[in-house]
């Protein structure tokens, strides 16, 4: 299970992902980075077929400037991603003798950034369709996305879109923690990037550790508030 999620904040956008890869055919689980830079003011993550995502990685790295300077980032991402999708779809062999499950080659891409004076969130789904979610303020992809969307809805009353990216980081971490606790195939270490107009910052291990402590403090403060509810 994979989850990549993004939240819009008052001064930017935060995008995060888990790092657990599960190979069910071989009974293996191992960490791998799912969140990658996209130029200086954006980042992207993917879910689905690793072969497709591995092909997208150098392509998006080389074309990041053109993507971020395009009049419509969604259209530009779609134009870059679709040929990779089609190549894998055309060469996919669904039925392999002796194999119970042929797997699949579908992949999702979620990118977030800051350009033209505003944050944006773009999804390219396996059919090549573009989704824009900056107006919604939250989006998630991956097999863990339904649970992430539910967790995001439960946090919506905290109005993350009116708060700074510092709050957004803790909100993303809290959703990832919830999925880590409820799903054996979502796990850390977590990758998070906060993106403002001046650029994207990918959190290091110490900053992730601080965000985890901030998340725990948030839960403690909620507990204190609940304890005083009927005082």
Image (cartoon, grey):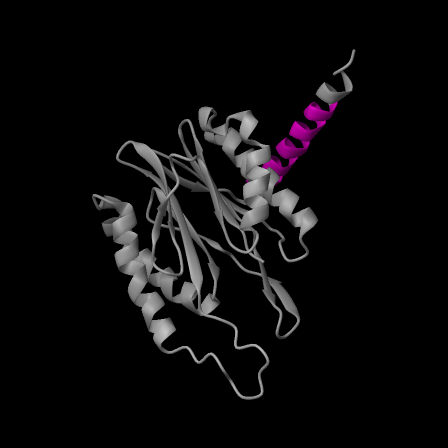
**For the point 63% across and 75% down, which residue is it?**
26
Whether 226 is drawn above or below 60: the answer is above
Q: Quadrant of the C terminus?
A: top right
Image side of residue 170 versus residue 131, left or right: right
- Residue 130 sits above or below residue 230 on the image: below
- Determine whether 147 is above or below 59 in the image: above
Q: Residue furthest left?
A: 71
Instruction: State the residue in front, 33 or 132.
Output: 132
Is residue 72 visible in the rendered image? The answer is yes
Find the magenta span and give its range.
Answer: 206-223
Relative horizontal placement of residue 74, taking residue 109 as reference (left or right):
left
In the rendered image, residue 216 lying in the magenta stretch gets the answer: yes
Quadrant of residue 19 within the rendered picture: bottom right
Q: At x 55% / y 37%, what residue is drawn? A: 152
Most foreground residue, 49 or 149: 149
Residue 75 locus on image (x, y percent): 26, 51
Q: Is residue 206 visible?
A: no
Question: Where does residue 11 sit, x and y in percent of width and height?
Answer: 40, 28
């Amino acid at each position: 299970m994979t989850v990549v999620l993004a939240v819009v904040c008052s001064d930017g956008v935060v995008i995060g992902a888990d790092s657990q890869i599960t190979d069910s055919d071989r009974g293996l689980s191992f960490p791998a980075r799912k969140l990658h830079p996209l130029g200086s003011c954006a980042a992207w993550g993917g879910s689905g077929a690793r072969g497709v995502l591995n092909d997208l990685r150098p392509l998006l790295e080389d074309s990041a400037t053109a993507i971020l300077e395009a009049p419509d980032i969604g259209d530009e991402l779609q134009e870059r991603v679709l040929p990779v999708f089609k190549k894998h779809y055309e060469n996919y062999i669904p039925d392999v003798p002796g194999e119970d499950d042929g797997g699949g080659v579908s992949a999702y891409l979620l990118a977030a950034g800051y350009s033209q004076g505003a944050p944006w969130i773009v999804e390219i789904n396996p059919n090549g369709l573009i989704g824009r979610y900056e107006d919604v303020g939250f989006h998630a992809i991956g097999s863990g996305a339904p649970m992430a969307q539910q967790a995001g809805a439960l946090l919506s009353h905290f109005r993350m879109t009116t708060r700074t990216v510092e709050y957004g980081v803790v909100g993303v971490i809290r959703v990832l923690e919830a999925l880590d606790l409820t799903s054996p195939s979502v796990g850390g270490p977590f990758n998070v990037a906060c993106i403002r107009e001046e650029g994207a910052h990918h959190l290091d291990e110490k900053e992730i550790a601080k965000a985890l402590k901030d998340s725990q403090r948030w839960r403690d403060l909620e507990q204190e508030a609940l304890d005083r509810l009927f005082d």
